[in-house]
Image: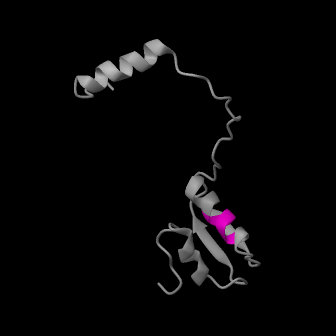
């Protein structure tokens, strides 16, 4: 198909999209959002349509504050890794 880009990664592929073109993005999850944001970041002026079977957007999660890992957790990971990683 002319103008079909099977994957938006790396986002440099989107440079081939004319800035005034109407764009259809299949999927409304993270890759679809990444594509729309990448086009917008490149100054895209045309319409961007995201479509999917369920029409759902990715869930928004609150930013997490970093928590240090407990020494017991770190020790458990090291032990599991030393045993070949089967328990990870």
In percent of width and height, residue 30 lies at 58, 53
**Residue 53 visible at all:** no
Q: How many marks?
A: 0
On the picture, is 87 further left or further right than 2? left
**Residue 23 visible at all:** yes
- The picture quadrant where one finds residue 46 is bottom right
In percent of width and height, residue 16 lies at 58, 83
In percent of width and height, residue 9 lies at 50, 66
Foreground residue among 28 and 63: 63
- The picture quadrant where one finds residue 53 is bottom right
Foreground residue among 14 and 22: 14
Foreground residue among 64 and 27: 64
Image: magenta residue range: 35-39
The quadrant in which the C terminus is found is: top left
- For the point 65% across and 41% down, the residue is 59
Provide the major secondary structure of the magenta segment.
Answer: helix
Q: Is residue 44 above or below residue 64?
A: below
- For the point 72% across and 69% down, the residue is 40
On the picture, is 7 further left or further right than 80? right
- The picture quadrant where one finds residue 15 is bottom right
| 30 in the magenta segment | no
């Amino acid at each position: 198909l002319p103008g079909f880009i099977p994957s938006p990664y790396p986002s440099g592929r989107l440079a081939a999209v004319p800035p005034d073109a109407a764009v259809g993005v299949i999927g409304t999850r993270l890759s679809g959002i990444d594509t729309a944001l990448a086009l917008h970041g490149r100054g895209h002026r045309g319409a961007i349509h995201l479509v999917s079977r369920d029409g759902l957007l990715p869930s928004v999660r609150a930013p997490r504050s970093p928590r240090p890992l407990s020494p017991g957790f770190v020790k458990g990971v090291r032990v599991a890794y030393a045993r070949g990683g089967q328990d990870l």
